[in-house]
Each structure stands twice: as C-alpha cells, then as structure tokens.
C-alpha cells in the first residue's frame, strides 16, 4: 500500500502529464490496464510524467484512477438523475462483444470523449496519433454491414484483457467506401494512421487498442478485410532475377493460416547469438512499432541492412552486458552469422497468411518469392 503523500504526489504528476498531452483520464486508465506495467508506452508515460514507480505502486495507482473515474461518473449521474446514465468505454468492455442494431433513437449514448473520436473517424477527419486512442467501441450503426467472427493467427497469445479472454477471436465487418477513402488518402498512409483508422472502424469487438495489435495479426486482418469486402481473388506482381514483372493471381481464401509455435508462449523472448555469445531479449512487432506495416517496403522479400537494423533496434528489449545507449552500435556491428541466427529465429516464430503455392517466372523458369503487397487493385473486385 502506497503512503498517502506518495500516492498524492504520483497522481498529481499524472494529472499534469494528462493535461500537458491533451489526454483524458479515461484514456490513460484504459492504456495502463491494456498495456500493463512492463509495456514501453506505460514506461514512456510515467517517464514523461517524471515518476518512477514500482509494480506494487503501479497497481495501486491504476486502482485509484479507476476509483476516481467511478466517483466522477457517480457525480455526473446525480446531476442528471432524470436522464439515463451513459455507459463508459470501460462498461462496454466489461460487457464483452456488444453489438447493437437498435434505431438511433433507442441507442444509449457513449461518453462524450469517445463520441468525439468516433465522430471524427466517421467523418474521415485527421486525428493526431499522439493524442487519439484507437480503442474500438464495439458499436454497429444501423446502416453498417453486419459483423462476423474471425480468429486471429496469434489466437490471442501475447495480449492482455479482451483478445486473451476471447482466444484471439473478434468481430469484424467488411470495409465500405469510408474505409476505401482512408486507404487511398496519401497523408493517412504516410503517418501510419490509415490502418488504425480502418481497424477501429471495422473491428466491432469493444476494448481493443488497434495500435497494440501484433503486426502479423494486422497483416492478416487487412487481407481478410479485402477478401470479405471485394472478393478473395487478388492480383499481385512478383519479379524474377532479371527484373521481369510476373503477374500472379492469388486467392486469399486459399492461403494457409499459421499460428505461433506451441513452444513459443512468452514475450519478450531470448536468443543467444552464436558468435558474440550475447543474449538478446526481443519482442514481437506491433502496430505501435510499425508506422506502415502494409507497404512494399514492409513486405520486400529482401530487406536491406539499414531497414533490418532499424527494425531490430525497435524490437530489442535488452542486450546482455550492453547499455541501452550502445544498442544501435552493437546491432549495426553484428556479423553475418549472428544476423542470420536472428533472422531465422523470427522466421521460425512467424505466423499469419502464408503463400505456399510455387510460382515460376514465364521468362526465366525460376521459382518466384511471392510476398503479400498492397497495390492498385487492392480496392477493386477482380
């Protein structure tokens, strides 16, 4: 139990950080619950607030914030005794997969701060990613297409709360013109907002932070959405060693879906490099780590050294005997055998859609390496 003076100091600094970053108490509470004590975003938030806390203090502070939110809500209820109390986002999350197709006049309103974010998304307005919470609300308006249940390749592993509780199953609806406009807006693509805007619109299971979705799950969701929205057949272009463009027709519904190896249960995970002998702790890539996960750069069959170094640095949690300021230098100076070991480790634990068919170049006869990429036909029925 935290001493009262210590708790008051921590809460005061949290309030200051919330005001400084134009956030709401509800958003912070949800983030801390969803991310947990060890997540980078949690640590960055407390660092920005100028607070260093223990795990026990973290639990107490999260509980105290929840109590404050409940008290504020009760005060609001007393002031509006004659009106029906609006459910909060936390209440929606507790109810699980809330789907309603009631006429607008019969729907219960949601909290103002959540309605403001939802309204901006429905209008395709730009939302600053450092202020917005891409938390799904679990509400379907009467003019939206129906939602269907799908299981993520991760099966809910490496998540907390909602996806863990549902074993990776969520409700999702097809994309509409609204999402097509988002995906064809260059400024949304450049900032990486487009994918979270689409996922937040289309995912109809409440309480999922789309920025926390694993990159492999995000790739799966985008192509699954393409299949249920425009049809499963999709034309892509692969290049042989002579740079000849080879047109290939994929059927997304026929692609194999793989899951994480059963032995791979925990994140971060550790690997020991064969040459340097150092042990590295690494995490899986998530939306927050990928500014744009569905681009030709992200899915190149051969990633250049600078790209790989940047990605590896982003996913590094610890390096044995190496201080954090020296991680970048350590990674850029790894020799080939150690780099190969890291790449093979990520390949071994990778999951999601897999292109198993063998395609050959009509020009050279060689086998082609086919990668899932977004192109001009992504939003077009074949």
Image (spheres, grey):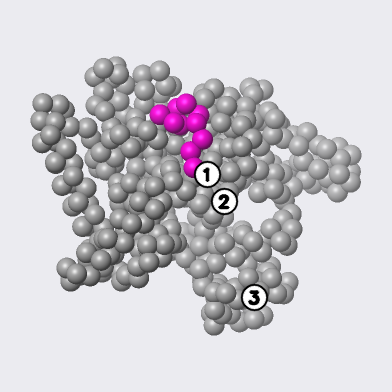
- Which residue, given by chain and number where applicable, does mark 2 sit on? 290
- Determine contact: label 2, label 3, CB under 8 Å: no
Residue visible at 24% across and 26% down in the picture: 108
Q: Measured from the top left, where is residue 343 in percent x and y? A: 65, 63
Residue visible at 15% across and 47% down in the picture: 71
Residue 330's disc is 3
- Badge 3 marks a residue whose secondary structure is helix
Up-down relation of residue 208 to residue 326 (above or below): above
Asked if residue 76 lies left or right of residue 121, the reply is left
- Which residue, given by chain and number where applicable, does mark 1 sit on? 218
Which of the pair 347/278 is nearer the observer? 278
Q: Measured from the top left, where is residue 58 in percent x and y? A: 29, 64
Q: Is residue 122 one of those drawn in magenta?
A: yes
Q: Which residues are magenta?
A: 119-128
Callout 3: 10 Å neighbours few (<14), some, many (20+)? some
Residue visible at 37% across and 62% down in the picture: 49
- Badge 2 marks a residue whose secondary structure is loop
């Amino acid at each position: 139990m935290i001493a009262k003076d210590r708790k008051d100091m921590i809460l005061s600094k949290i309030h200051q950080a919330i005001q400084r970053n134009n956030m709401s108490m509800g958003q912070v509470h949800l983030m801390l619950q969803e991310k947990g004590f060890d997540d980078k975003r949690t640590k960055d938030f407390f660092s920005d607030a100028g607070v260093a806390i223990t795990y026990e203090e973290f639990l107490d502070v999260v509980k105290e914030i929840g109590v404050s939110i409940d008290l504020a809500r009760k005060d609001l209820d007393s002031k509006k005794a004659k009106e029906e109390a609006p459910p909060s986002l936390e209440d929606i999350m507790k109810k699980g997969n809330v789907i309603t197709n009631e006429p607008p006049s019969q729907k219960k309103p949601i909290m103002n701060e959540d309605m403001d974010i939802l309204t901006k998304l429905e209008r395709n307005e730009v939302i600053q990613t450092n202020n917005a919470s891409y938390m799904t609300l679990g509400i379907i308006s009467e003019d939206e297409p129906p939602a269907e249940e799908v299981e993520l390749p991760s099966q809910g592993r490496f998540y907390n709360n909602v996806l863990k509780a549902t074993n990776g199953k969520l409700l999702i609806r097809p994309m509409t013109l609204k999402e097509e406009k988002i995906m064809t807006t260059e400024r949304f693509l450049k900032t990486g907002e487009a994918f979270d805007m689409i996922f937040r619109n289309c995912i109809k299971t409440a309480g999922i932070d789309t920025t926390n979705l694993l990159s492999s799950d995000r790739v799966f969701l985008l192509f699954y959405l393409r299949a249920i929205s425009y049809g499963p057949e999709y034309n892509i272009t692969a290049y042989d060693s002579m740079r000849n463009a080879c047109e290939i027709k994929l059927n997304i519904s026929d692609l194999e879906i793989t899951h994480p190896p059963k032995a791979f249960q925990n994140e971060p995970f550790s690997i020991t490099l064969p040459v340097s002998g150092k042990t590295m702790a690494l995490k899986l890539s998530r939306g927050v780590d990928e500014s744009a996960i569905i681009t030709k750069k992200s899915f190149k069959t051969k990633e250049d050294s600078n790209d790989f170094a940047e990605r590896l640095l982003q996913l590094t949690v610890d390096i044995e005997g190496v201080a954090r300021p020296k991680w970048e230098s350590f990674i850029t100076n790894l020799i080939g055998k150690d780099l190969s070991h890291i790449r093979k480790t990520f390949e071994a634990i990778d999951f999601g859609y897999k292109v198993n068919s063998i395609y050959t170049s009509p020009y050279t006869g060689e086998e082609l390496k086919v990668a899932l990429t977004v192109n001009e036909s992504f939003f077009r029925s074949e």
